[in-house]
Image (spheres, rainbow, N blue to C red):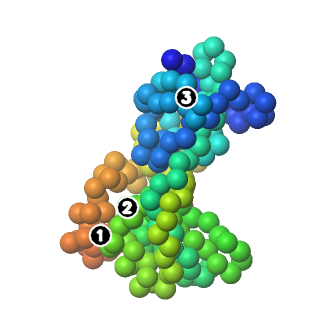
Amino acid sequence: MIELTQRIAPVESAEIFDSLTLPFELRIRGRLRATTDNGTDVGLFLDRGPVLRDGDCLQSNAGEVIRIRAADEPVVTAQIPAGLPLARLCYHLGNRHVQLAIGSIDEQTGWVRFPPDHVLEELAERLGATLKRHQAPFDPEPGAYSQAGHSHSHGESHEEGHAHGHSHSHSHSHSHSESHEHSHEHEHHHHGHGKDHVH
């Protein structure tokens, strides 16, 4: 088994030994046994650093480099006009403490991607989004969640000022289901923290 212990800057393709395709829930973890795309057993023994993102590279003590790939998984992608509609959608979804991937198709149209959840889907449609339910990589915005408890990781110190929002991130896996009954309280209660969840 190859033991991957170091996060390294991206390297040339020629130097990459293999790739490892993982869904988001496994890219959160620093300790993991897995099998690479070419069938090699690997173990991750990483510091509690940021979530692994698509294209990140890990290295073993022996020097092998493995590139992380975001696996296709069930997601909902909400398309909405760029500008204020997109900002409003991100704000209201972010207030539900859910991880979001955000991007744009062109200057006129943006998109927000999140795990399937009928409450969030209804909210997005109410705000004017067109939904697509499909399989795609889920590579959410880095931010409070990736910084929980380790704001001193490389190049991330600018996040330290938002530390008060980090504690919310740990309840991520079940908080949005709890908020179905309390969505109004959540929305008003967390207005002050909205920026933490959507930057």
Q: Depth-wise, is mark 2 or mark 1 nearer the camera?
A: 2
Up-down relation of residue 89 to residue 96 (above or below): below
Neighbourhood count class around disc 3 (C-alpha, 10 Å): few under 14, some 14–19, many 20 upward: few
Up-down relation of residue 130 to residue 181 (above or below): below
The CA distance from mark 2 to mark 1 is 9 Å
> Upstream in the sequence, badge 2 or badge 3?
3
**Residue contact at pointers 2 and 1, CB within 8 angstroms:** yes
> What residue appears at the point 55 percent right and 41 percent down from the top-left corner?
21
Residue at label 2? 97
Amino acid under label 3? Gly
Up-down relation of residue 44 to residue 128 (above or below): above
- The answer to which of 78 and 92 lies nearer the viewer is 78
Find the residue positioned furthest to the front.
39
Amino acid under label 1? His
Residue 196 percent across, percent down from the top left = 46, 59
Answer yes or no: is residue 168 visible.
Answer: no
Residue at label 3? 39
Which type of secondary structure does the marked residue at label 3 adopt? Answer: loop
Residue 186 got which mark?
1
Amino acid under label 2? His
The quarter in which the C terminus is drawn is bottom right
